[in-house]
Image: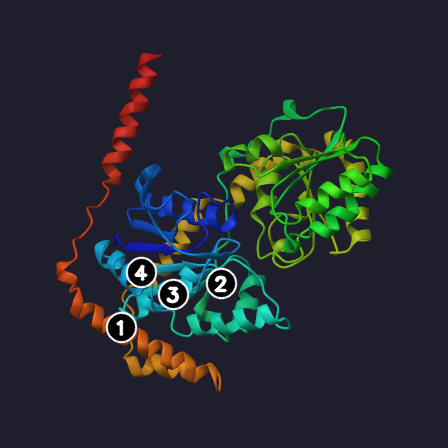
Amino acid sequence: MRSLSICMVSDFFYPSMGGVESHLYNNSQCLMQRGHKVVIVTHAYGQRRGVRYLAGGLKVYYIPAQIVYSNASLPTFFCTFPIFRQIFIREQVEIVHGHQAFSTFCHEAILHARSMGLKTVFTDHSLLGFGDASGIFINKLLKFTLSDVHHAICVSHTSKENTVLRAALEPQQVSVIPNAIIAEQFEPDSTARDPRWITVVVLSRLVYRKGVDLLVAAVPRICAQHARVRFVIGGDGPKRIDLEQMREQHQLQDRVELLGSVAASDVRSVLVRGDIFLNTSLTEAFCIAIVEAASCGLLVVSTRVGGIPEVLPRHMVTFAAPEEDAVVEALSETVGLVGTREQHAELAPVHFHRQVKRMYSWHNVAERTERVYLKIADAPEPPLIERLRRYYGCGLVAGKLFCLVAAVDFLIGVVLAWLWPSERIEIAQGFDYARYRAEIGRGEDQEKEAH
């Protein structure tokens, strides 16, 4: 099988937590196991800057950048070209894979990669509307990026329809590859639950898009209707103060526990405390959190938005419209179901876990992503005039602006190639993944023999 050198690029990566970060890390690890070279480029997080190696030899470039909002870096257009070019040449990158429409680094890396003649892939992890100012701006930016990308990936069929409309793409140019989890890390544990309570767990960024306003309205009503229900809420964000005020106003300190930010390693220990997982998102392309919750054996209550109806079988989840009354009704119905789970074999936590394990695997995601890479790896490179023609079709005014940006970026690439020829850039030493796995295996064998 052909081995490829891949560069994943996004503003969103560890130590930040979220679905994009998890997707980048786990997909990269599985691609490395399949024999490919993978490096990740993101912006610096505090003191975490420069080059770092993560588990399995995954190499990460943390580039210093100014952050403007929600971990997205300040747009610089051409200023990142020199450092991206150095990385692409040092790592002998063949395919640049950008993630998330909100990531500035993603768009800039794809632009620079195309100016260097590299193959590009884009994965969209979000849904956006068409009527608000931010949505219009991001959609136009996405149209610019995807006009010259070789292939696009979406995490759900709903997300694909949204992206095809937003970027005016041909549907056959977009593949659907869902997120996944490591099911072994999310096994049920019935001993962790408190039998005196019916515990509802919420794990989410506490922002408007995640429906925290719905949560604030629903919690007091559910607590008033069901004396045995309590809430465990993990996550942080600007909406946390609303939850704290709600808890104080309704005197629910003993029934609403706010955990703050939860580390990835602690997610399972929080989930297994619960009987029900509540998701109140207003928009969601996939929602990996409900998959983790179902794998831990929790019943799921979620708003019916975006790609969420595609994620889990109907017996695992109760849907509600993104409205206060609907969320309260769906949650009350599920609270009544908790006590009868033992009477229904298909609702057993262990059965949930086994089903999720069969449905979602990062190895399957990596295999499907690999097919996309191999499909575009030998695609012919269009001339510059063809690339400019694609940009020109992006709009009466925007098209001309996009052509100017692409032309200037191409000329900057020519100047950089003259100032720092690629033959003068030192090639980075590769990580011997096969040797690493062999050493790990020997260590495990020696440990077993010692016991």
Tag 1: amino acid:
Ile
**Viewer-nearest of discs 1 and 4:** 1
Residue at the spot x=69%, y=50% of the render?
212
Q: Which residue is mark 2?
A: 101
Q: Residue furthest right?
A: 225
Tell whether label 4 touches label 1 (CB within 8 Å).
Answer: no
Q: Between residue 267 and residue 344, name the one nearer to us.
A: 267
Residue for badge 1: 412
Q: Is residue 226 left or right of residue 38?
A: right
Give the residue pinned by disc 4. 95
How crowded pointer 3 is (Cα within 10 Å; few <14, some 14-19, many 20+) is rated as many
Cα separation between marks 1 and 4: 20 Å
Mark nearer the N terminus (4 vs 3): 4
**What mark, if any, has residue 110 been given in the picture?**
none
Q: Amino acid at mark 4?
A: Ile
Residue ID for mark 3? 108
**Eye-nearest disc, 2 or 3:** 3
Question: Front-most of 402 and 370?
Answer: 402
Q: Nearer the viewer, mark 1 or mark 3?
A: 1
Q: Residues within 10 Å of mark 4 (few under 14, many from 20)?
A: many
Q: Earlier in the sequence, mark 2 or mark 3?
A: 2
Residue 380 lies, in percent from the top left, at 27, 73
Check the image and report above or below for 382 versus 101.
Answer: below
Residue at (15%, 65%) from the top-left corner? 421
Instruction: Tell me: 252 left or right of 165.
Output: right
| C-alpha gap between disc 1 and disc 2 | 24 Å
Mark 1 and mark 2 lie on one chain; the one further toward the N terminus is 2
Q: Quick check: marks 2 and 3 in contact, CB under 8 Å?
A: no
Q: Secondary structure at mark 1?
A: helix
Quadrant housing residue 204: top right
Q: Counting other residues with Cα less than 10 Å from the Cα at mark 1, is it few (<14), some (14-19), or many (20 or more)?
A: some
